[in-house]
Structures are given as C-alpha cells and as structure tokens.
Amino acid sequence: MSKAKSFGKKVIDFNRDLKYNGKLPPNFKVLNPFFDNPETMEVMTQFYNKFYNDTKKRKFIIGINPSRHGAGVTGVPFTDTKRLEAVCGIKMLSAHTHEVSSVFLYEMIESFGGPKKFYSKFYINSPFPLAIVRKAKGGIWLNANYYDDKKLFESVKDYMIESLQKHIGLGLDTSEVFILGKKNADFIEILNKEKKLFKKLTILEHPRFIQQYKSKDKQLYIDKYLLALSR
C-alpha cells in the first residue's frame, strides 16, 4: 500500500503547477515567483517539507495575493527572506527582502508558540496565489490587489474560485476560515455565497494595515488573532 501524500507535498505540487493564462485589464501583470527564480522553488519546497510533512487537517488563513517582497520572492505567504532564515531556518541566497506584513505575522506566530506549532494547525495562502503588479506613472510597476480594479476582479474571479477549491482539496478544515482584511472579506463572501466553500468566515485586520497604521496597538491585534485562532 502506498503511503499517503503529505500536506506539504500537496502544496509543493500545487505551487509547481501554478500558472495564470487568463486575460488581464491594461497595465496589470501577473508575476510567478516559481518561474522567475529557481531558488524560490527550492526554498518553498524546504519550507513545506519542514513544517507540513504530515497528513493533518489544517484551518485556512486567506490573504489577498502575494506581495513582490514576501511570497513573491520566497514562495511562502507572508514570509520575507529575513524571517524565512531567522525564524524558519531556511536561507535564501539570491534575494534579501523585508516585507511589512511578515513582521506582524511572525510576532503573532511567536506568541502562538512558534512556527512548528502554528504551521501544524494553519495553512496560509491567497485566493489569487500569484503576485499582481500595476503599471504606474513613469512606467514603474507597483503591488496591486485583485480587488483594486473591478475589471481585474472580473478577469480573475473564476481562477480565484478554482484556486480556493484546489486549496480545500489539499486537506483543509472548511468549518471556519480566517480572512485577512475587511475588503478582502467582502470579495471572499461574494465567492462563498456563490460556491458554498466555507461554513463560517472570521475576519481579522490585515497584517499590513496593523503594522502600517496601528503599530502602537500591535499587542491588542496579536491578542485578537490569538483569541480567534485558539478557539
């Protein structure tokens, strides 16, 4: 009898197959970190083999879409190269990034009991699992969210539903899902009403919002996360 595939191996396979071939409105572009940098695939594989080498069910924490400095480089949601090395013990040689959301998330993970305990219970990803950028004035490319433009959301909506269904297929507990960001939650609610993916949606403030605008109250938000995630 063949051994069941681990949760981590399923995530690695999901990431290896990631591609977006759909249309996008003008001035938007999708970046695939696994295609753009071979080391991203290597460190992502190390991460999921290290923290997800089992067949346990996990709760799903849903972000928006990867940023260029977090998962857009490391392939691991809300994890820049600093925390990938310092906290997760995985060094990335080809890039050095600092991502604001990663700071808050890993402080919360530390309070939860550390990455081994946290990742044994939770899986983080996004309904649109690749980075989106938008061309700004002067031809500069900036991070974009899937909901920043109505036409963009309509373009990627079917892909997002398919992506969420694939995430659930990895072995997720769908009784409660945690959504980061209130605007993000509005759009996930639309998809959930349509496809009945999750029973209960719990909304938490996005780490970037906390770090950028509420840093004085950071401990209150860490406590709020811990309360929600420890139920």
Image: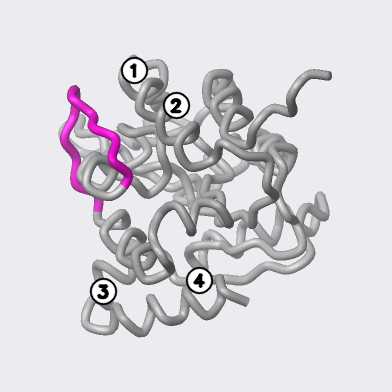
At label 2, counting other C-alpha atoms closer than 10 Å, the crowd grade (few under 14, some 14-19, many 20 or more) is many
At label 1, counting other C-alpha atoms closer than 10 Å, the crowd grade (few under 14, some 14-19, many 20 or more) is few
- Tell me, yes or no, whether the highlighted magenta stretch contains residue 144: no
Three-letter amino acid code of the residue under disc 3: Tyr
Q: Which of 222 and 211 is in front in this view?
A: 222
Query: Mark 2 or mark 4: which comes first in sequence?
Result: 2
Q: Residue at x 64, y 32 (%)?
A: 6
Residue denoted by label 2: 45
Q: Where is residue 135 in the image (x, y as percent from the top left)?
A: 29, 34
Residue denoted by label 1: 36
Q: Can you tell which quarter of the image residue 112 is in?
A: bottom left
Residue denoted by label 3: 213
Residue at disc 1, secondary structure: helix
Distance, label 3 to label 4, CA atoms, is 15 Å
Residue denoted by label 4: 204
| Image: magenta residue range | 88-99
Q: Nearer the viewer, residue 5 or 134?
A: 5
